[in-house]
Amino acid sequence: MKKQIKSNDVMLHTLTRVVTFIILAFSVYLFFAGHNNPGGGFIGGLMTASALLLMYLGFDMKSMKKALPFNYTSMIAVGLLIAIATGVSSMLFGYPFLTQFFEYYQIPILGETELTTALPFDLGVYLVVVAIALTIILTIAEDDA
């Protein structure tokens, strides 16, 4: 009878947590910088998907599904609805589809901050990209054939 050896993945788990935090922080930066600089919902979503994929690789699938109980198919639908609603909302005011508006507001801690209608559109793109990337990769990973 073979004795089953349990692996000690303390280094892997620790490094995965640290690197995932760094990647997620960078993806949030890219998401918010995308209106005036390179970045936005698409690249921010890809970075977030890569961070979550790293977590799936470092830990087992069962514990990750318990820790992140998201239905990625529903997330795709929500992201598409947000992106489409952003585009259609400008049409309600007589402007062309996806016309961007922005205004500067004085926010107590942040000071003068630009708020733009591109942010909800980027949020929709972000959700769609994260959900599609993880759905495809996890479907391939779970395939037994």
Image (tube, helix red, strand yellow):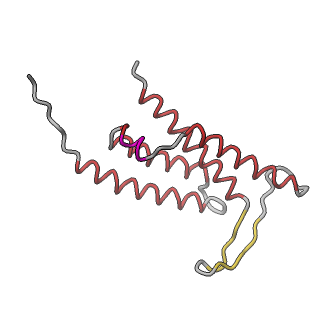
Residue nearer the viewer, 78 or 48: 78
In x, y percent, where is residue 87?
A: 78, 50
Residue nearer the viewer, 67 or 33: 67
Please, which residue is most extreme toward the top here? Answer: 145
Please, which residue is most extreme toward the left here? Answer: 1
Magenta span of residues: 63-67
Residue depicted at x 10% and y 25%: 2
Residue depicted at x 58% and y 43%: 129
Q: Is residue 111 left or right of residue 142?
A: right
In x, y percent, where is residue 97?
A: 83, 49
Q: Is 96 inside the magenta-drawn segment?
A: no
Q: Where 112 falls versus 16 (above or below)?
A: below
Q: Where 143 falls versus 23 (above or below)?
A: above
Q: Is 66 inside the magenta-drawn segment?
A: yes
Residue depicted at x 73% and y 60%: 117
Q: Is residue 61 left or right of residue 110?
A: left
